[in-house]
Amino acid sequence: MQTGHPPDASRSLADEPEDEPPYGDLHAFSDPDLDDIAVAAAALCRAPIALISLLDQNLLWFSARVGLDLPFGPLAHSGCAKIVALKAPVVIPDMQADPQTRENALVCDSPGLRFYAGFPLFNQHGTIIGSLCVVDLAIRDAGLSALEHKGLAALARQSMRLMEVRREAIAQDRRLAAQHLSNQQTAEPARDADLDRRRVLEKHALHQATGATSGIGIYELDFATGRITVSPEVCRIAGLPPSPTISAEQWVSLMHPDDRERAPSLAGLIDGSAPLRLQYRILRTNDGKECWVLRQGILDRDDSGHPVRLVGTIQDISPERNTTARLTTLLAIGDALRTAESRQQALEDSCMLMGNRLGIERVGFARITTREELFIVEQSWCAPDIPPFSGSFPFQDFQHTSDFLRGGSVFVLDDITRTSWMRAEQAGYGSVQVVGQVVVPKMTGEDLTGCLFVHSARPREWTLDETSFIRAAADRIFAALDEWDATARQEIINHEILHRLKNTLGIVQSLAHQSFRRDTDQAALATFSARLVALSAAHDLLMKKNWRFTDLASLVTGVLTPLGLETRVAPNGPFVSLGPNAATSFSMLLHELATNALKHGALSVPEGSVSLQWHLQSQGSDTVISLVWQEAGGPPVTTPTRTGFGVRLLKAGLGYHGGTKLQYDPAGLRAELTIPAQAMATD
């Protein structure tokens, strides 16, 4: 890159016939509108550097630049040199790999340019006077997208229009200067008027270019006349035929009826009480579609400070609003699926949310049996004016649809009446008022097991955002249905296991009765049977949780209720999760304490009572569960002289993780059990 003093920049551009430079002094060249175009080009292509370069023999003057501080550079080994040679746009994925640009100092050294995309600037004679380019420090093998290519081409043309406006303005300035020498008084007003016209032309051209590429229109409301001067983009957003002005009343009539009361009054705008930034809906004139717009503005005041006009922008923000609304709906669908108490409720709530968001006539789910070749509608939500939709539908009435879904692809249909290859199914769809639809297949492995359908009673051009939203919602619904189905299957299995376990315990109990039928003392048999009942209660609770866990309060109720003690024992404590082993052990411990209290302790007399308390406490880095069984109001308690099975079971406590302390206080037995909470939940 050349350093030191720049060369004489007042000489003419290459191939230009004029004696004086047609675009002025390139060294002192500065045009904020061209700077704006460079900014727009960089933003369009997400590039850190954008340049508008003008040729000056073997030099390039960077008349507008973003991301590069150098005012000029050599033409040799530049991307612009290739544009001049080819007279066409040039895209270089990697300048370091290109033989014509790899020796460029900005490629070899800092900042290390890599990707280049440039478009020529042709003057009115068809001569290239420079280029508009974007440059990246990273390699882009994919080059430009179609939208980026189209946008850069439009910005290059607009740059040239501004340059031509500048050239004519400079030429006019020179003519006016010559005229000024002969008649300064008459030339001065003409020159000022021409400069004003030039500014208007430049701004209008820039407004058209930036509006077309960014979707932002420009307006100016004159408070004196009530007329609104609008750019072409404003007309496009509102669906109006191109017109330079519209009335304020005409614009208010475009607003959605529910939003018209938010339209600011002229008096409110003048006194500053009305907001200058406002979001609302309009109904497009050409197609009647709803469109969200963002209106922003600033007040222009006269020399006395009185507001005379409102100048600002109109932007179509429908895509952003729709994206936000659909993300919110997806979150709501997830919440509905997570909190639903049944499979039917999960489908009903999620289909309703989808239908309301899409503004559609019908959303539903159909189970598919490929053996019988049937669509069986399980659930459908319908708009108020659409009849209910249910029943079974054979594949043969919807052969193309079923064949398509079997491949696992989303089936999108805009208008069945205009789709020739669907003619055989038009009668079937017509019978259920379907013209357009999106159907998402539910695949289990390679088998088609269901589908989510979205029906429109009129032709509809499905957008990419809409189909993506439907697919995302379907994925969530299908995952929830799989979980519901898995839970249902597990409940069947658990029910069968519990049934067989109870049969086994019944056989054990029967064997015990047979073994002790001649024994005159039936107390041991009764104790054994009661222990089986306590064990069965623990199993019942665990089965309800898929044998993963139960909670302490539920287990206490399950053990005490068969003994008729649910009103005489007062349990109290926080929620504590019990694993399968801990639940089984604790049910046996609790049963021994309860039966001992019934036979010998506080519950053997009417006035006796039992308090069962548990709480969590910290011991170092661990959390420990402490449980206390305290009897009161019963016969005096004495220490037992012999140790039976029940006492041994109580002293064993909850295994090697925990500890047990029995206190034979004459006022009432006290049993204290401790165990780490982690062991209680996982064992």
Image: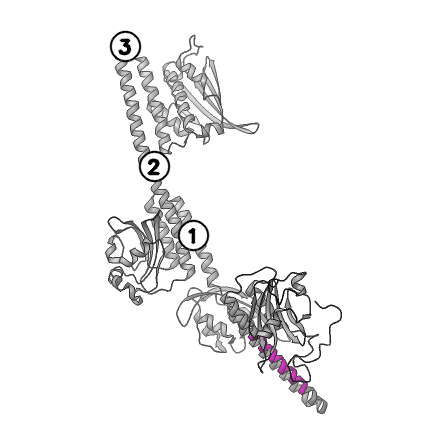
- Relative to 129, residue 661 above or below: above
Residue at the bottom extreme of this rendering: 182
- Among numbered discs 3 and 1, the one appearing first in the sequence: 1
In the shown orientation, is residue 143 left or right of residue 178? left
Q: Which residues are magenta?
A: 157-175
**Residue 47 or 653: which is nearer the viewer?**
47
**Which residue was labeled with disc 2?**
490
- How far is disc 3 from disc 1 in space, using C-alphas? 69 Å
Q: Position of residue 571 (x, y in %)?
A: 42, 26
Which quarter of the rendered picture does the N terminus lie within? bottom right
- How far is disc 2 from disc 1 in space, using C-alphas? 28 Å
**Which residue was labeled with disc 1?**
330
**Which residue was labeled with disc 3?**
519
- Relative to 503, residue 397 above or below: below
Tag 3 secondary structure:
loop
Q: Position of residue 675 (x, y in %)?
A: 49, 24
- Among numbered discs 2 and 1, the one appearing first in the sequence: 1
Number of other residues with Cα within 10 Å of mark 2, as a class: few under 14, some 14 to 19, many 20 or more:
some
What amino acid is found at the position of numbered circle 3 in the picture? Asp
